[in-house]
Image (spheres, grey):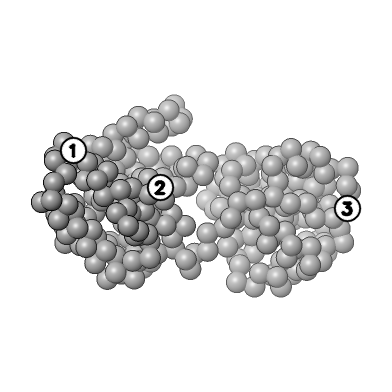
Amino acid sequence: MTIITADDEPLALEMLTDLVKSVKPEAEVVSFSRPQKIIEWLKDNKADVAFLDIRMRGMTGLEVAEKIKEVHPETNIIFVTGYDEYALPAMSLHASGYVMKPVSEEKIKKELEQLRFPVNDANSTLLTARCFGNFDVFDTKGNLVKFSRSKSKELLAYLVLRAGASCTIRELAGILFEDGEFDSAQQAYMQQIITAMMKGLREVGAEGAVIRSYNSLAVDASKIESDYYHFKRGDKSVLSKYEGEFMAQYSWAEYVSGYLERFVPN
């Protein structure tokens, strides 16, 4: 988890930063005394949570929040202030929380436990799926995950596209084999494909990324990091990596490319 703290008063910033570190010692905490520096930092970085003092010189916390939301809509904004008249405009920005000064560990902890946008713990991520361009999937060490059957990888790609929605085996067979008859032979082949997919995932410790139930499959999207998932959560900045192709090796994914094109800046 990456957390921003911002206050133009040095002592207030130090106290806020120390309290956040005390409550969330495992987090990366980046502090700013000048709001303009946050905008520069955001060009190459992303925060899960931002504690912003509302009354800062040069740019208010409200203005900073607007800039953050433009590039990273899922960032949890928590305003920090001693003036309750700012509560209404703060909430109009769909902030995650609002902390009144004096700040305390108890107040910080309460806000971090009730975030508007849940933060995906990096330790729970089992796979990284690259969907822009050709589809590929990587383990936690960045190594390409290999499957003994190409259809097993295609099966996983479709499940990633469905982003946690449950898919029946018949539906999946229809995607992989188009108009092929779903007879006993195809059902048996589907089981071989599923077994090969699970074996490939098991070899990299990522079996838990797929949820198996009676006659259906789904991915656990909370365990998968993906450019497409970031886009779906409202992070349009990932489109800088989009070059007109989405899971390009699979014809059934072509409609997504057309959808994404509508959001690419001219």
32 lies left or right of 72? right
> Front-most of 8 and 166?
166
Does dot 3 land on a helix, a strand or a loop?
loop
Residue 190 visible somewhere in the drawing: yes
User: Is there CB contact under 8 Å for labels 1 and 2?
Assistant: no
Residue 223 in the image, given as x and y percentages of width and height: 43, 60
Residue 220 in the figure: left or right of residue 50: left
Residue 4 appearing in the image: no
**What amino acid type is highlighted by mark number 2?**
Ala
**Number of other residues with Cα within 10 Å of mark 3, as a class: few under 14, some 14 to 19, many 20 or more:** some
Mark 1 and mark 2: span between their CA atoms? 20 Å
Which image quadrant: the N terminus? bottom right
User: Which numbered disc, 1 or 2, marks the residue that appears first in the sequence?
Assistant: 2
Q: Amino acid at mark 3?
A: Gly
Tell me which residue sits at (78%, 51%) in the image.
Answer: 98
Circle 3 residue: 82
State which quadrant residue 221 falls in.
bottom left
Q: Residue at x 59, y 60 (%)?
A: 2
Q: Which residue is mark 1?
A: 178
Q: Are marks 2 and 3 in contact (CB under 8 Å)?
A: no
The three-letter amino acid code for the residue at tag 1 is Glu
| CA separation in Å, label 1 and label 3 | 62 Å
Point out the tag, 2 or 3, that comes first from the N-terminus.
3
Q: Which mark is residue 165?
A: 2
- Which of discs 1 and 3 lies nearer the camera? The answer is 1
